[in-house]
Image (tube, grey):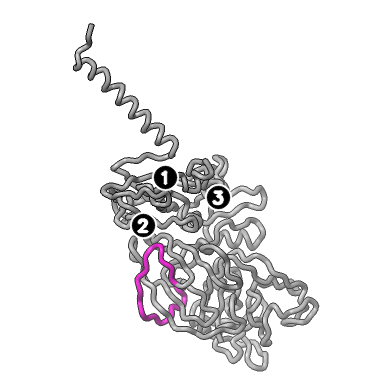
């Protein structure tokens, strides 16, 4: 019997639908992503979307390595948390092998890995963090893309995160807390910044993430020439990664003590922080406003000149300054506070603080100076002594501040900033951890 055309069409339709869906599923499985015309990117706290236009003829690095996108970048030290391939619409694609293949690849990584991806040619996929919206399906035209506001997700305890296989560096703490590892059992814990410092000072714990800098400047300079900067731009030595409601994340690449390859040290900046080193005499580039989510405003401060010793300078963040009212942490010293200093005859006198400074140093080393009477100070090698030398000039066995230098060695610095003060005495000297030192701010 001859089958009518209508019956034949009815039989062929489900077969064709099955074939098309199978092909689409296979394509998605191979590429670990899905191409749609309603692609939506959602912002996530602590993570960053980046984008690149893949090229044709299997010339992309993951294709040359015969790997999936995730496996390839994992081999390069980056974990791809999510990826989406968005096809262009309304654009002609050239047929040359080194031309774009008509899609844009979006990848989601941890904020700390964004710099690595930028070295591979990716750029930040920035947008308005207000609502969900379909991606613009145009070549690398993600400046028009909008991203949904990140939802506040529940953060499990650090111990629970560790037991699920999350590496120590990727363990998250709630806002305002920093990650430490207990010396006793090597277990992770999230504690307040000042608690973390005390644990580290007493040898009870080791900091994994540095304490968050004070969001307000203790001695704001006079500022001028305000300029607006956006995510992805570089100002001073700081490359802006993400603009958040109360802070800015990015990469700080100080040339001191030595310039480093790559984007620099991942850090968090606040209003009042300088985005360039000032220990070489440069005028500070200070964040004066965070215009979330679009931009930041940076103004130029007044240079205080090149300090004695150059870069890096100042005291460790855990230094205690002697005052008539007892020891005070250097970060808590304010303009006008009274500290112990010396006059030109070496007599100990009371003196008011007239200048305060802090310098971002990132990944660097400082001197661990130990005296025979038990006093100890962590300080930059180029910090001045009270007698006009540099700390690094001191030698084991010589007399310094009424005691013998027991040891002096370089150690890894565990904080982000170093600090200094200037009393209004004739000498400008002061006592840090009981040891008399000079000031770089004279």
The mark total stands at: 3
Residue at the disc numbered 2: 126
- Decide: is 131 above or below 409: above
| Frontmost residue, 413 versus 102 | 102
Q: Quadrant of the C terminus?
A: bottom right
Which quadrant holds residue 369?
bottom right
- Decide: is 262 above or below 44: below
Residue 23 shown in magenta: no
Q: How far from the left and from the top, in percent, is residue 169?
A: 56, 52
Seen in the image, is 202 located left or right of residue 162? right
Instruction: Kindly report the distance in space between the C-alpha atoms of the residues bearing marks 3 and 2.
Output: 24 Å
Direction bottom: furthest residue: 345
Disc 3 crowd, CA 10 A, few/some/many (<14, 14-19, 20+): few
| Frontmost residue, 152 versus 307 | 307
Q: Earlier in the sequence, mark 1 or mark 2?
A: 1
Q: Of the numbered discs in the image, which one, if any, rests on residue 425?
A: none
Seen in the image, is 173 located left or right of residue 183? left
Seen in the image, is 7 located left or right of residue 355? left
Q: Earlier in the sequence, mark 3 or mark 2?
A: 3
Q: Secondary structure at mark 2?
A: loop
Which quadrant holds residue 395?
bottom right
Q: Quadrant of the N terminus?
A: top left
- Decide: is 223 above or below 331: below
Q: Secondary structure at mark 1?
A: strand
Residue at the disc numbered 3: 76
Seen in the image, is 181 located left or right of residue 64? right
Instruction: Kindly report the distance in space between the C-alpha atoms of the residues bearing marks 1 and 3.
Output: 16 Å
């Amino acid at each position: 019997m001859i089958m009518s055309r209508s019956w034949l069409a009815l039989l062929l339709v489900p077969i064709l639908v099955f074939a098309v869906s199978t092909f689409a599923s296979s394509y998605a499985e191979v590429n670990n992503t899905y191409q749609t015309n309603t692609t939506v990117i959602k912002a996530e706290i602590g993570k960053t979307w980046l984008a690149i236009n893949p090229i044709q003829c299997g010339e992309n690095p993951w294709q040359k390595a015969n790997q999936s996108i995730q496996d390839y970048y994992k081999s390069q030290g980056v974990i791809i948390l999510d990826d989406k391939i968005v096809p262009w619409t309304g654009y002609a694609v050239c047929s040359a092998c080194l031309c774009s293949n008509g899609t844009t690849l979006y990848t989601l990584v941890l904020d700390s890995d964004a710099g690595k991806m930028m070295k591979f040619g990716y750029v930040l996929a920035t947008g308005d963090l207000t609502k969900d919206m379909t991606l613009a399906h145009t070549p690398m035209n993600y400046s028009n893309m909008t991203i949904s506001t990140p939802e506040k997700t529940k953060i499990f305890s650090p111990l629970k995160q560790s037991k699920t296989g999350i590496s120590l560096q990727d363990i998250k703490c709630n806002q305002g807390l920093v990650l430490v590892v207990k010396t006793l059992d090597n277990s992770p814990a999230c504690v307040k910044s000042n608690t973390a410092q005390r644990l580290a000072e007493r040898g009870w714990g080791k900091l994994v993430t540095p304490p968050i800098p004070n969001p307000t400047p203790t001695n704001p300079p006079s500022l001028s020439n305000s300029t607006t900067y956006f995510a992805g731009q570089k100002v001073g030595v700081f490359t802006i990664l993400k603009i958040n409601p109360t802070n800015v994340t990015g990469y700080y690449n100080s040339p001191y003590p030595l310039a480093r390859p790559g984007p620099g040290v991942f850090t968090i900046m606040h209003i009042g922080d300088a985005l360039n080193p000032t220990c070489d005499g440069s005028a500070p580039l200070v964040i004066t406003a965070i215009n979330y989510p679009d931009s930041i405003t940076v103004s130029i401060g007044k240079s205080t000149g090149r300090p004695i010793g150059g870069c890096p300078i100042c005291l460790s963040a855990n230094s205690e300054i002697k005052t008539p009212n007892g020891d005070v942490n250097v970060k808590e010293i304010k303009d006008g506070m009274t500290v112990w200093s010396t006059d030109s005859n070496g007599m100990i006198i009371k003196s008011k603080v007239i200048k305060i400074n802090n310098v971002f140093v990132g990944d660097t080393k400082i001197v661990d100076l130990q005296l025979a009477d038990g006093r100890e100070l962590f300080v930059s090698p180029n910090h001045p002594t009270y007698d006009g030398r540099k700390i690094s000039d001191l030698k084991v066995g010589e007399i310094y501040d009424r005691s013998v230098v027991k040891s002096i060695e370089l150690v890894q610095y565990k904080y982000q900033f170093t600090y200094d003060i200037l009393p209004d005495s004739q000498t400008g000297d002061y006592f840090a951890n009981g040891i008399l030192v000079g000031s770089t701010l004279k």
